[in-house]
Amino acid sequence: MKKSILTEREQEVFDLLVLNKSTKEIANFLGISEKTVRNHISNAIQKLGVKGRAQAVVELIKMGEITI
């Protein structure tokens, strides 16, 4: 199995993002703060070299990291 570009937690956050969950809903579901959710998203965006959440999701789908 290939190594994911995302950490396990970043993966969980993006799996919920593609289900159209808000930052607040993701935070509540995972039992973490909204700031932590935003940090995970921000870290993933930086790793991918994209400009925002939507672009990150598109890239991750293209890479096979997440599925819809």
Image (cartoon, grey):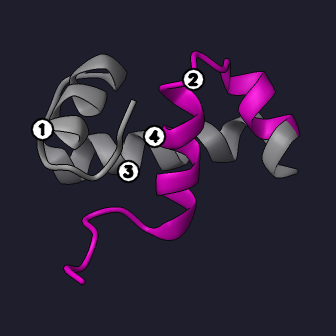
Residue 19, image x, y percentages: 57, 23
Q: In terms of sequence position, does the residue under pointer 1 or pointer 3 come before the other?
A: 3
Residue 9, image x, y percentages: 57, 61
Please name which of the two marks, 2 or 3, marks the residue nearer to the observer: 2
Q: Amino acid at mark 1?
A: Lys
The vertical placement of 3 against 20, above or below, is below
Q: Are marks 4 and 3 in contact (CB under 8 Å)?
A: yes
Q: Amino acid at mark 3?
A: Asn
Q: Which stretch is magenta?
A: 1-28
Which residue sits at x=19%, y=24%?
Answer: 51
Give residue 41's mark: 4
Q: Which residue is mark 3?
A: 43
Q: Mark 2: which secondary structure?
A: loop
**Rendering quarter of residue 58:** top left
Q: Mark 4: which secondary structure?
A: helix
Residue 50, image x, y percentages: 15, 32
- The span from disc 4 to disc 2 (Cα, nearest Å) is 15 Å
Q: Residue 48 in magenta?
A: no
- The span from disc 1 to disc 3 (Cα, nearest Å) is 18 Å
Please name which of the two marks, 4 or 1, marks the residue nearer to the observer: 1
Q: Which image quadrant: the C terminus?
A: top left
| Left or right of residue 59: residue 19 | right
